[in-house]
Image (cartoon, rainbow, N blue to C red):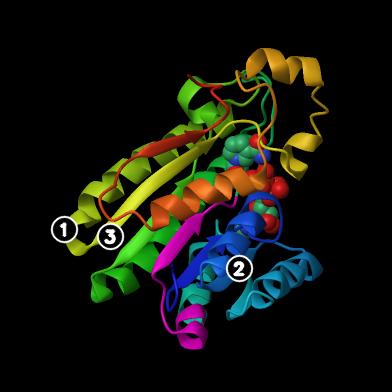
Amino acid sequence: MLKGKVAVVTGASRGIGAAVAKKLASLGADLALIYAGNDALAEAAAADCRALGVRAEAYCCDVSDGEAVKETVAKIKAELGGVQLLVNNAGITRDGLVATMKEADFDEVLDVNLKGAFHMIRHCSGLMLRAKYGRIVNISSVAGLMGNPGQANYAAAKAGLIGLTKTTAKELASRGITVNAVAPGLIDTDMTRKLGLKEEALKSAIPLGRAGKPEEVAEAVAFLLQADYITGEVLRVDGGMAM
Ligand code: NAD
């Protein structure tokens, strides 16, 4: 159970982030849901959490903006009392072959997916260090483990998140803070629906023969947030895809 703890989830307005927020609320955590732009969707996700009997507030914040993250974390502390759990889930794709990829698309994906997690960890870990307790989970991807044609920027950011996870795990372990990563495979969300993948293609690429559900990723995140003796781990939730 996570009763009495405050969880910050980035990219929580939809998809995997919304499922994680709801799962943590079902375990009793209070929620700060960070999102990029869709106020109505974020408010609805926060309302879903409140319906489970916890406090939940939505905060619009671009995680790639360090100053905005600093201000938002201070606001969360003032309104919810602290941060014990952090899930870095916000992510975007700007796919293209490396030879023709625009530099701006490379930078934007790195800024949101990797630097965003860095900003969040910096500002939340300050609060965790003082309390000598914290649990952090970064959402990486099997693309960061295997590479994926057309996703040089995304795979680099997701591989970078694994390095960030292991380094911060080592830096923060002695202070009661664990840092782990979850590497989803193909999960059925807005991000992947636009790819229009055929069932046959999924069956051949994924040993378990289907895309995963956001709730199945949320289960793994909740497990790692409650584990006291696991740190620096990368847990695949991919139906065997990156085996
Ligand atoms: P999604 O596109 O459905 O949702 C992304 C969320 O991130 C949204 O809430 C959006 O508001 C938020 N976001 C985007 N840019 C932001 C920014 N600059 N600041 C704050 N929030 C921002 O995506 P999803 O499929 O739910 O993916 C969630 C995470 O899981 C991402 O990091 C993604 O890379 C990762 N992932 C997804 C899959 C998949 O198959 N869907 C597979 C592996 C990893």
Nearest the eye: 93 or 77: 77
Whole-angstrom CA distance, mark 2 to mark 3, is: 21 Å
The disc at residue 158 is: none
User: Which quarter of the picture shows residue 53?
Assistant: bottom right
The residue labelled by disc 2 is 33
Name the residue: 54% across, 46% down.
113
**Secondary structure type for disc 2:** strand
Q: Report if the beta carbon of the residue with label 1 is closer than 8 angstroms to ligand 1.
A: no
Would you call the spot at circle 1 few (<14 residues within 10 Å), some (14-19), or many (20 or more)? few
Q: Residue furthest left?
A: 174
Calculate the distance from the C-alpha at mark 2 to the C-alpha at mark 1: 28 Å
Mark 3 lies within 8 Å of ligand 1 (Cβ measured): no
| Amino acid of disc 1 | Ser
Position above or below: 107 against 150: below
Q: Nearer the viewer, residue 19 or 128?
A: 19
The one nearer the camera, 2 or 8, is 2
Residue 217 shown left or right of residue 3 in the figure? right
- Report which quarter residue 84 is drawn in: bottom left
Q: Secondary structure at mark 1?
A: helix
Which mark is drawn over residue 174? Answer: 1
Residue 123 colored magenta? no
| Residue for badge 3 | 177
Residue 119: x percent and y percent? 44, 59
Name the residue at 28% across, 44% down. Answer: 167
- In the rendered image, residue 115, in percent from the top left (x then y), is placed at 47, 50
Disc 3: CA contacts within 10 A as few (<14), some (14-19) or many (>=20): many
Q: CA distance from mark 3 to mark 1?
A: 7 Å
The region drawn magenta spans: 76-90
Q: Amino acid at mark 2?
A: Leu
Q: How many marks?
A: 3
